[in-house]
Amino acid sequence: MANSSMRGGRSRKFKSEINVVPYIDVMLVLLVIFMAAAPMVNPSVINLPTAGKSALPPPEYIQISLKPDEAASIGITGGKSAGSQQTVSSRAELVRRLKAMHAENPETAIMIAADKNIKYDEVIQMVSEAKKIGFERVGLATR
């Protein structure tokens, strides 16, 4: 009767395995939640602040209007030497005309106006080119 507590003479072994099925269920639920929430978040939308007008705009400046199709227009606005806007077909031609205007009057300020559909990089490249040419005052036009 010494073996009566063993029930049939077999010893009981414990399982030393982890049941991962509940973890898989939780991970699938989280995956579905993130997949449903991801399209609702639009990180490309940036709300830019509006800027007020400057206190004292320059009396005469070169206005550059950038368009998304590589076209642009350039001309002098205000002052005694104001002229009409000239349309250029490429950025290289725009830089060439800007260099010619700098040679005529290096103290003139520049105002860059860009279409809202243009890449921000193109505006920054134009500001950089104007600074490389030697213009001291370069501004951005706002509404």
Image (cartoon, rainbow, N blue to C red):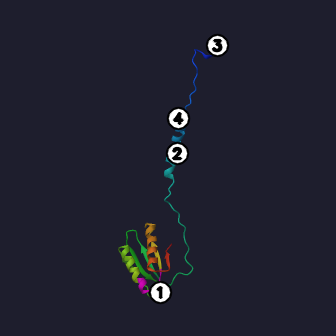
Q: CA distance from mark 2 to mark 4?
A: 19 Å
Q: Name the residue furthest bottom.
A: 80
Q: Residue at 46%, 70% (x, y): give it.
A: 124
> Please, is residue 39 above or below residue 18 in the view?
below
Residue corresponding to mark 2: 33
Q: Position of residue 106 (x, y in %)?
A: 45, 84
Q: Is residue 55 visible?
A: yes
Proximity of marks 3 and 4: CB atoms separated by less than 8 Å: no
Q: Position of residue 36 (x, y in %)?
A: 50, 47
Q: Under tag 1, what secondary structure?
A: loop
Q: Residue at 51%, 47% (x, y): give it.
A: 34
Work out whether residue 4 or residue 35 is closer to the camera in this orientation and state it. Answer: 4
Binning the other alpha carbons within 10 Å of mark 4 as few (below 14), some (14 to 19) or many (20 upward) gives: few
- Closer to the N terminus: mark 3 or mark 2? 3
Q: Which numbered disc, 1 or 3, marks the residue closer to the eye? A: 3
Q: CA distance from mark 4 to mark 1?
A: 78 Å
Residue corresponding to mark 4: 21
Q: Residue at 55%, 81% (x, y): give it.
A: 56
- Closer to the N terminus: mark 1 or mark 3? 3
Magenta residues, start to end = 101-109
Q: Which numbered disc, 4 or 1, marks the residue closer to the eye? A: 4
Left or right of 133? Residue 20 is right
Proximity of marks 3 and 2: CB atoms separated by less than 8 Å: no
Q: CA distance from mark 1 to mark 3?
A: 116 Å
Q: Position of residue 39 (x, y in %)?
A: 48, 51
Q: Residue flagged by tag 4: what amino acid is it?
A: Val
Q: Under tag 3, what secondary structure?
A: loop
Residue corresponding to mark 3: 2
Q: Under tag 2, what secondary structure?
A: helix
